[in-house]
Image (cartoon, rainbow, N blue to C red):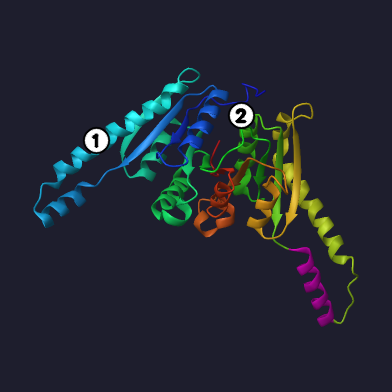
Amino acid sequence: MSDPKRLKHNPVVAAVDFDSSLANTVKVASELARRSQSKLILLHAVREWSTYTTSTLEGNMGLPLGDVMAANLQTEIEDARQQLNDLAAPLRNDISVELKVVAGIPNQVVAAEAVLVQAQVLILGSPVDSWRRKEHRLSTLLSVLNEAPCPVLVVGSAPLDDKIQAVAIADDLTPWSKPAVTAAFYFAEALDAPHVYHLHVNPLQRERFAQALRRYAQRQGTHVRPESANEFFKELEHDLSMQLRERAGEETVWYPDREGRYTASVLHGPVIDTIETAISKDQGWNAGLIVFGQHRTFHRKPFRAGNVPFGEMARLGKLALIVPPEAA
């Protein structure tokens, strides 16, 4: 079982949008709150039109739109609070639940609330269809990832396993992603996952490297032993694996052999495809949670931030945790 001394007691914030990922979002958030003995905050953001926009429309149309919009906003807030009450009712027997309905720009509201309550984690739903049909939802999610002060857990709408069997850390071995290693062990402990896989994906492929090495040798008029590429990759894997273990450091003490296992793995190939294969149920480790390090300039580094990977993970029915560099 999880060690209570290891776990935080900061609130768990679940930003819900009453979409197809709602059930999974509440399920994961309530389980984390229960295991870490924390309060669960169910948050819903109602989009509010700015005063400037309202006055401009009133001027152009000659109608008192401000009063109508204010009435509609109040109705949306009341409806959302009632829905949150219905969600919270069966949870209050086990955990403390607080409800918040806030009007404003969703991504700003969600990030601001996470700062105010000093959230240990911010959980957001990501319906599968949002990646192709709802660009505004994707834009909001990316904005929250860029502004959140704490790890962001993205939950898809595909069926989730009852228990997380393994946690996988996608580590690019840069300083930016070091906090992701600490966060991954914390969530593995909180979710009672029996195994942590710490992986680094090297996009350099063995066969292509061997071919390039042979072409280079031919141009130089030299000879390359057939086993040279294999020897190079063997040394590279050893070096990268040692770096992974060093980065994990004392975190692995929370996973002694009697309770769980830690494995450092170096994989080769296209980043996204390799990660998908590694964490899959049929061909890999069956990891229910994949952890990425977050770069603040992540829109320029998609593989590091997860703006492509976390969409793919949600599609696969996996939880994706994105950890900002300053996360404690």
Judge whether 211 appears above or below 191 on screen: below
**Can you see residue 43?**
yes
Residue 90 in the figure: left or right of residue 318: left
Q: How far across and how far down the image is residue 192, in percent?
A: 66, 29
Tag of residue 75? 1
- The stretch in magenta equals 205-220
| Crowding at mark 2 (Cα within 10 Å: few <14, some 14-19, many 20+) | many
- Under tag 1, what secondary structure? helix
**Label 1 CA crowd tier, 10 Å (few <14, some 14–19, many 20+):** few
- Which residue is rendered at x = 81% and y = 82% of the image? 219
The span from disc 1 to disc 2 (Cα, nearest Å) is 38 Å
Tag 1 near tag 2, CB within 8 Å? no
Q: Quadrant of the N terminus?
A: top right
Which numbered circle lies on residue 95?
A: none
Residue 137 point in image, percent of width and height: 41, 50
Q: Which residue corresponds to mark 2?
A: 190
Residue at the (21%, 51%) spot, across then down: 53
Q: Is residue 211 magenta?
A: yes
- Closer to the camera in the image, 196 or 318: 318
Amino acid type shown at disc 2 = Ala
**Above or below 90: residue 220:** below
Q: Quadrant of residue 80?
A: top left
Q: Secondary structure at mark 2?
A: helix
Rendered view: 126 above or below 6:
below
Quadrant the C terminus occupies: top right
Which residue is drawn at the image coordinates 79% and 67% (left, top)?
A: 207
Residue 214 in magenta stretch: yes
Amino acid type, label 1: Thr
Please tell me which residue is depicted at 50% across the width and 38% down the height of the picture: 150
Image location of residue 278, percent across then percent down: 70, 49
Answer with mark 1 or mark 2, whichever residue precedes in sequence: 1
Which numbered mark, 1 or 2, is in the foreground of this view? 1
